[in-house]
Image: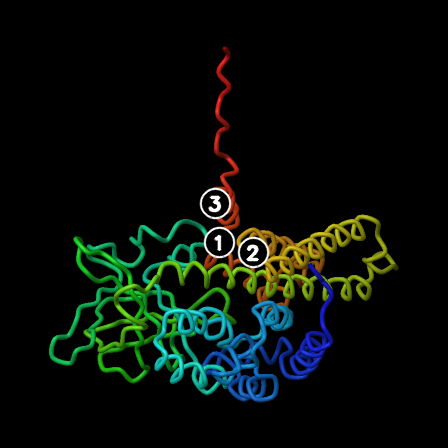
């Protein structure tokens, strides 16, 4: 394994940090999340056109940059530093891999180019608070009760004999960027109890019977929506027979875990950097707070945590099979770092409006969406048969 970054990767990092440094400060972030879209549309188009950010991991034949998921993870480390509110996670990390893995040649040709160009955004709708389960991050997704399981609940799909398509009905309570996405990828249950299976359907933003409402969330930089499907016409993604939907979701989850880990590391590193800057300026008893030995020790511990989490995230970007463990370590690091940042900022840090709380909210919300940490680690241990008892030796 060669852990050194290429010149192109270094250039992506430098350019992205420069753009976000000018356009995505804390005040700009707070203003962007309060817009109708939940993000700065002009900045999103700039990132798409100048850097090709949505299409970093899309093959060149479909209008993408043709890089690897590792490059996307590297870019997301920088967007995490800025807490960039954008459709990048919902579109490039969660939706594009599913279209590429399950879509027919016609669907890939029609959808991947506009997704890579940033002109079309997408969102993955998974019924219930089960996104981590559907992506096989915190448990096996093969059982499928999260999508309805053959009984009431979730989203149900039925074939439409008249049109030859499908109709969806049900509700999804938490959809990342679901209020503004031009395309929804809806995981729905079909086949009844006897032939129970989960499929993914494409729903356009203007589909009749589709009702979307933005929800109030702890972390405004991760906007979510409630999706109601009232007998909505939909197009099946891929072919009904032979599509390994659960396998595609699990593969997407492994890559997403590596990307999210890198993003969390970027946020933790920036929270630490802002804290170090503050304690060097803030004076108490006639000297800088950062000169006290106890504060130095706490900051040193945080630095070690961040560097260890960064190493794990980079390794997971190279080997996505380790994404779950890397994500657990990164989320825990972000939570601890954000908490220490609030405390080391003193009385001003405890005010809800302080910038340090942006990182705290991101840490708490991400663990709710993709964790919790102990379940990520437990599932990784189960997959590795870490706690399988060894066979006993029989005395002869």
Q: Looking at the image, is mark 1 or mark 2 earlier in the sequence?
A: 2
Residue underneath mark 3: 383
Q: Depth check: 142 or 239 in front?
A: 239
* Quadrant in which the N terminus appears: bottom right
Question: Label for residue 371?
Answer: 1
Residue 77 vs 307, above or below: the answer is below
Image location of residue 342, percent across then percent down = 65, 59
Q: Identify which residue is drawn at 39% across, 50% down.
A: 140
Residue at image point 61% right, 88% down: 50
Check the image and name the residue furthest to the top: 396
Residue 24 percent coordinates (x, y): 62, 79
Mark-to-mark CA distance, 3 and 1:
16 Å
Instruction: Give residue 344's position: percent from left, percent from top.
Output: 71, 57
- Report the number of numbered marks: 3
Q: Residues within 10 Å of mark 3 (few under 14, many from 20)?
A: few
SS at badge 2? helix
Question: Alpha-carbon distance for marks 2 and 3?
Answer: 15 Å
Between 9 and 188, which is closer to the camera in this rendering? 9
> Where on the picture, by quarter, is residue 23?
bottom right
Mark 3: which secondary structure?
helix
Which of the two discs, 2 and 3, labels the residue nearer the N terminus? 2
Which of discs 1 and 2 lies nearer the camera? The answer is 2
How has the structure been colored for display?
rainbow
| Label 1 to label 2: alpha-carbon separation | 9 Å
Q: Tell which tag, 2 or 3, sits nearer the viewer.
A: 3
In the rendered view, tell whether residue 110 sits above or below residue 140: below
Of 331 and 52, which appears nearest the observer? Answer: 52
* Residue placed under numbered mark 2 in the picture: 327
Question: Which image quadrant for residue 232?
Answer: bottom left
**Which residue sits furthest front?**
396
Earlier sequence position, callout 3 versus callout 1: 1
Residue 164 lies, in percent from the top left, at 17, 78
């Amino acid at each position: 394994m060669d852990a050194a970054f290429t010149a192109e990767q270094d250039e992506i990092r430098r350019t992205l940090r420069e753009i976000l440094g000018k356009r995505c400060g804390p005040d700009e972030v707070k203003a962007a999340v309060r817009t109708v879209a939940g993000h700065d549309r002009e900045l999103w188009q700039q990132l798409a056109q100048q850097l090709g950010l949505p299409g970093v991991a899309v093959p060149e034949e479909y209008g993408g940059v043709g890089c690897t998921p590792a490059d996307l993870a590297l870019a997301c480390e920088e967007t995490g530093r800025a807490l960039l509110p954008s459709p990048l996670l919902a579109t490039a990390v969660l939706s594009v891999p599913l279209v590429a893995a399950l879509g027919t040649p016609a669907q890939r040709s029609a959808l991947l180019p506009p997704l890579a160009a940033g002109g079309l955004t997408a969102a993955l709708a998974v019924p219930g608070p089960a996104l981590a389960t559907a992506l096989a991050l915190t448990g096996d997704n093969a059982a499928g009760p999260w999508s309805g399981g053959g009984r009431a609940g979730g989203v149900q799909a039925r074939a439409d004999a008249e049109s030859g398509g499908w109709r969806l009905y049900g509700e999804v309570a938490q959809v990342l960027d679901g209020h503004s996405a031009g395309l929804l990828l809806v995981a729905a249950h079909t086949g009844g109890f006897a032939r129970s299976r989960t499929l993914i359907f494409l729903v356009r933003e203007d589909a009749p019977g589709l009702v979307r409402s933005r929800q109030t969330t702890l972390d405004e930089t991760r906007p979510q929506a409630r999706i109601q499907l009232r007998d909505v016409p939909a197009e099946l993604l891929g072919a009904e027979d032979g599509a390994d939907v659960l396998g595609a979701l699990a593969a997407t989850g492994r890559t997403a875990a590596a990307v999210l880990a890198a993003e969390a590391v970027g946020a933790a590193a920036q929270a630490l950097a802002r804290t170090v800057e503050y304690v060097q300026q803030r004076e108490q008893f006639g000297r800088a707070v950062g000169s006290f030995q106890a504060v130095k020790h706490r900051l040193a511990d945080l630095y070690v945590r961040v560097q260890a989490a960064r190493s794990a995230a980079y390794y997971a970007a190279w080997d996505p099979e380790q994404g779950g463990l890397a994500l657990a370590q990164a989320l825990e690091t972000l939570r601890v770092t954000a908490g220490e940042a609030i405390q080391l900022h003193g009385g001003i840090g405890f005010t809800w409006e302080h910038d340090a709380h942006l990182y705290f909210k991101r840490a708490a919300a991400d663990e709710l969406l993709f964790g919790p940490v102990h379940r990520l680690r437990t599932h990784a241990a189960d997959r590795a048969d870490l706690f399988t008892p060894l066979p006993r030796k029989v005395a002869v």
